[in-house]
Amino acid sequence: MKGGDEMYCMISVNQVKPGKLEALTKFLEKDFVPLLKKSPGFRGAYAVAGPKGEYTGFMLWNSRSEAEAYAKSPGRKKLLEAAAEFYEGTMKPQYGEVIIAATA
């Protein structure tokens, strides 16, 4: 992004088990959001429920190093283990530099 305003994004796409979306939403709000808000460099997060039961999470960070520190944190690993009951398969996050951002 121009002007040295670096931003980094972690994206994860998962398939939610049938009937688990509401429970997953409550779990994310209760457990993941507080951890994110305490994490250095955290800028924002979005969770999107797709039409076929897929869930996509977008988490924004000031820098790659801060995103990677969060990704390796013991708190995140513990929460991912607890969240496994909501997902089918294994989460495979992707990471990348945000090259353009726009808000209203």
Image: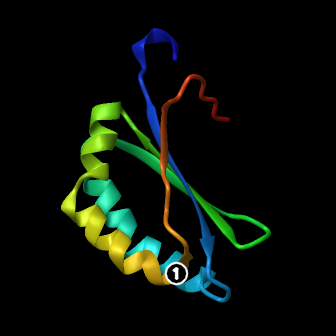
Disc tally is 1
Q: Is 61 drawn above or below residue 44 in the view shown?
A: above
Q: Residue at (52%, 17%) from the top-left corner? A: 1
Q: How is the image coloured?
A: rainbow
Q: Residue at (62%, 82%) from the top-left corner? A: 17
Quadrant, the C terminus: top right
Within-10-Å neighbours for mark 1: few <14, some 14–19, many 20+: many
Q: Secondary structure at mark 1?
A: helix
Q: What residue is disc 1 on?
A: 86
Residue 57: % across, % down: 55, 56
Is residue 41 rendered to the left or right of residue 102?
left
Residue 92: % across, % down: 50, 55
Extreme residue toward the top, this view: 3
Front residue (pair 41, 53): 53
Q: Can residue 52 be seen by looking at this rendering?
A: yes
Front residue (pair 8, 42): 8
Is residue 14 rendered to the left or right of residue 95?
right
Front residue (pair 38, 94): 94
Give the quarter of the image for residue 60. Answer: top left
Q: Can residue 63 be seen by looking at this rendering?
A: no
Q: Residue at (25%, 52%) from the top-left corner? A: 72
Is residue 85 rendered to the left or right of residue 68?
right
The amino acid at mark 1 is Phe
Q: Is 4 drawn above or below residue 100 in the view shown?
A: above
Q: Is 49 drawn above or below residue 67 in the view shown?
A: below
Residue 21: % across, % down: 61, 80
Extreme residue toward the right, this view: 51
Q: Residue at (34%, 42%) from the top-left corner? A: 67
Residue 24: % across, % down: 52, 79
Give the quarter of the image for residue 29. Answer: bottom left
